[in-house]
Image (cartoon, rainbow, N blue to C red):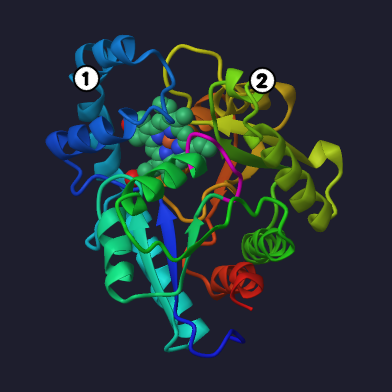
């Protein structure tokens, strides 16, 4: 990759994170850190502290741990495994002594501060942070910015810092997702309707200036366009609602429960907002929601995997970085 000779650059892929193990106590520890982040739950602190400690953490971890056990592998959490693989393969693809590639998690391990401090010890000239969130949200991307800021604040010498804020309409990303859908259809045949499901957010965040909803709409429309789909052949939905407030609509589960009565008994579902497979895709979408759809009268339901550590995904990362490295 072309870059200024002698300039040492660190590239850090950052993903959300997972518990260390699918047990109630480890999931509780993970959720305490995750849901304690004011970017994720933006309620008055004292009120949320009471809700979190008395109504969420005593109950949710048991249920979530059960879900994590459904998708846990001998290599650990799929999210952490695929992120590590992607990072390793990106390092090989960039093939440069001057570019140091690593990965970290916003919550849990590997700890973001450890990875940034390791970059500091290597006396890099520049650090590029690439959050693995194609669509920007204050709840995810901005939280990575906060965490990086917390780490570098005490440093005397802060190198150039670049953040890749989003890539929701990046040509290589859209093409990679569309091609992965085409490849799936080529192998398994094609169902009547394609659902594109994105992680949800509290709806009020859009009014407060969070562009996530618009990014998801744009990503989905571009993928549909690239696949040559008519409006009746695909639908955008939002999954993983948490709590009682209104989240972005339409809700994935409600749509799936209604579709069979409306005559759509066959669906394929893809989650373009998830760079790699995780609890929310493998358990909620591929397992739990499938059961609900079939119970509501659906006949065929297939989950199309995330880009994960595929060569095509590595190429997306190289393409995203190439302009920054030049
Ligand atoms: C409390 C509200 C939540 C917001 C807002 C939220 C936004 C958000 N999350 C992701 C990506 C992932 N979320 C994952 C798990 C997960 N998310 C929430 C809650 C919110 N997410 C919870 C409570 C959990 C934990 C599991 C559970 O108890 O249900 C994951 C999976 C992690 C894994 O280990 O596999 C991902 C990935 C995005 C992209 C997003 C906003 C755009
Ligand atoms: Fe989430
Ligand atoms: Fe979920």
Q: Is residue 137 magenta?
A: yes
Ligand 2 falls in quadrant? top left
In three-dimensional space, the C-alpha distance between marks 1 and 2, rounded to whole angstroms, equals 31 Å
Residue closer to the observer: 64 or 148: 148
Secondary structure beneath dot 1 equals loop
Residue appearing at x 59%, y 84% in the figure: 3
Question: In the image, which residues are magenta?
Answer: 134-140
Task: Say whether residue 279 is visible.
Answer: no
Quadrant of the image containing the N terminus? bottom right
Q: Residue at x 34, y 75 (%)?
A: 123
Q: Which disc is residue 59 wearing?
A: 1
Residue of label 2: 207
Secondary structure, magenta segment, majority class: loop
Left or right side of 175 for 96: left
Q: How many marks?
A: 2
Q: Is residue 232 above or below residue 292?
A: below
Query: Does the residue at mark 1 contact the one at mark 2 (Cβ under 8 Å)?
Result: no
- On screen, 44 above or below 99? above
């Amino acid at each position: 990759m072309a870059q200024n000779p002698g300039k040492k650059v660190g590239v850090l892929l950052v993903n959300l994170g997972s518990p260390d193990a699918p047990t109630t106590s480890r999931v509780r520890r993970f959720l305490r850190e995750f849901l304690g982040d004011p970017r994720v739950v933006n309620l008055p602190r004292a009120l949320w502290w009471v809700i979190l400690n008395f109504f969420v953490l005593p109950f949710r971890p048991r249920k979530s741990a059960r879900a994590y056990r459904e998708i846990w592998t001998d290599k650990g959490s799929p999210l952490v495994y695929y992120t590590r693989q992607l990072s390793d393969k990106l390092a090989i693809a960039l093939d440069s002594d001057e570019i140091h590639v690593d990965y970290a998690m916003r919550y849990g391990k590997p700890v973001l501060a450890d990875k940034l401090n390791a970059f500091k010890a290597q006396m890099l000239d520049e650090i590029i942070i690439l959050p693995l969130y194609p669509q920007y949200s204050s709840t995810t991307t901005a939280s990575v910015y906060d965490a990086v800021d917390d780490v570098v604040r005490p440093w005397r010498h802060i190198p150039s810092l670049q953040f890749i804020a989003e890539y929701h309409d990046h040509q290589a990303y859209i093409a990679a997702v569309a091609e992965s859908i085409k490849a799936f259809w080529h192998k398994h045949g094609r169902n009547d309707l394609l659902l594109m499901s994105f992680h949800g957010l509290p709806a009020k965040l859009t009014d407060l200036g969070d562009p996530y909803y618009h990014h998801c709409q744009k990503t989905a429309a571009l993928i549909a366009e690239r696949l040559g789909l008519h409006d009746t052949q695909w639908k955008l939905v939002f999954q993983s609602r948490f709590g009682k407030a209104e989240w972005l609509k339409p809700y994935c589960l409600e749509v799936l429960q209604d579709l069979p009565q409306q005559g759509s008994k066959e669906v394929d579902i893809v989650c373009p907002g998830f760079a790699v497979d995780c609890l929310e895709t493998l358990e909620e979408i591929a397992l739990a929601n499938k059961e609900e759809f079939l119970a509501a009268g659906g006949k065929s339901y297939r989950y199309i995997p995330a880009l994960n550590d595929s060569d095509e995904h590595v190429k997306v990362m190289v393409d995203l970085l190439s302009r920054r490295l030049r």
